[in-house]
Image (cartoon, grey):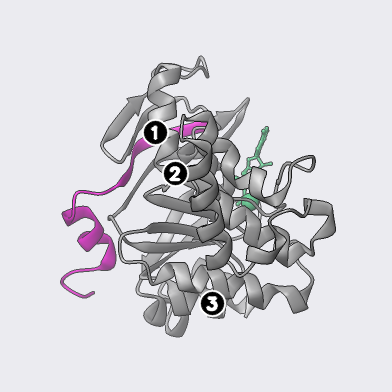
Amino acid sequence: MAMQSPAAVAEAAAPIIRFDGVTKRFGALTVLDDFSFAVAPGEKVTLIGPSGSGKSTVLRILMTLEPFQEGTLTLGGHGYHQPGGAGAFRASEKHLRAIRCNVGMVFQSFNLFPHMSVLRNITEAPRAHGVPRAEAEGRALDLLGLVGLADKKDHFPAQLSGGQQQRVAIARALAMRPRVLLFDEPTSALDPQLVGEVLGVIRSLAHEHDLTMLLVTHEMRFAREVSDRVCFFNKGRIVEQGDPERMFRSPEHPETRAFLQSVL
Ligand code: ADP
Ligand code: MG
């Protein structure tokens, strides 16, 4: 064991994301059991692990899309806590909105608004938060440039390929200038020939020093390339985590070894 594991470094740097003893149940099913996890500002972390192990649930809780029963979540200095099993958020809607503004999320299935142009998809959230139209559109055009789709601003989602739609979804997730960007299997729904263009955009974002990224993916080579830390997640807990080179070369835990053998 190294003196300072990546996890220890994350702990030391006043984390931007912190789960403290979070328990999440769906009825009788406990998906997260006393889950603790911290991510440092600017850190790029990948969660890998079998289907059904709770990876999406972690991201959805972070996005405040999913209530939890016990423990505390702290995001960008905004903490909230949920006692008991009621399943309702105790934080006010205003507090939740403040948390949400810090976080952007990209889903497996793009989730663009089908009846809105590409530009509107990206300006919608900033406009709803009071950003003047000209400024929101200026920002959206910059973001479309970043993902290589400036010429598609007036198209509708159905007129775009899956890879293009996902690049618009990434631009949309950045529109509120979040400090944290979450990706939930962003390339799993894409035809193989479209995966590269989306990974290319995520790779360029990974070079942004200030942006914290939490990525769930089955693209192991990509995870190795862009992550500061890889966490192997199974049955609602982190079994093993560390430097990607080390994890993929010599996983220590038998569960990690078995999983990596099944996907590599
Ligand atoms: P992963 O993303 O690792 O595949 P998920 O976080 O989606 O895993 O799911 C973890 C477990 O929680 C699974 O057993 C799944 O069936 C269950 N689950 C997820 N969402 C719900 C829900 N809304 N209602 C009931 N069970 C759910
Ligand atoms: Mg999932």
> Which residue is found at the position 24% from the left and 68% from the top?
5
Which of the labelled discs sits on residue 103, or is there none? 2
The answer to whether residue 31 is seen in the rendering is no
Specify the amino acid type for callout 2: Val
The residue beneath circle 1 is: 99
Of residues 45 and 200, which is closer to you in this image? 200
Specify the amino acid type for callout 3: Phe
The answer to whether residue 32 is seen in the rendering is yes
Measure how far apart labels 3 and 2 are at the Cα level. 22 Å
User: CB of mark 2 within 8 Å of CB of mark 1?
Assistant: yes
Quarter for ligand 1?
top right
Q: What element carries label 3?
A: helix
Specify the amino acid type for callout 1: Ile
Which quadrant is the N terminus positioned in?
bottom left
Q: Is mark 1 on a helix, strand or loop?
A: helix
The residue beneath circle 3 is: 222
Q: Give the range drawn in magenta.
A: 1-24
Question: Where in the figure is residue 198, as x and y percent of width and height?
Answer: 63, 69
Of residues 75 and 55, which is closer to you in this image? 75
> Which residue is found at the position 50% from the left and 48% from the top?
175
Question: Where in the figure is residue 152, as x and y percent of width and height?
Answer: 71, 61
Q: Please tell me whether residue 20 is drawn above or below residue 221 in the rendered image.
A: above
Of residues 19 and 232, which is closer to you in this image? 19
Question: Where in the figure is residue 206, as x and y percent of width and height?
Answer: 42, 69
Question: Where in the figure is residue 166, as x and y percent of width and height?
Answer: 67, 59
Name the image quarter holding residue 73.
top left
Q: Is residue 236 found left or right of 117 in the rendered image? A: left
Mark 2 burial class by Cα count in 10 Å: few <14, some 14-19, many 20+ = many
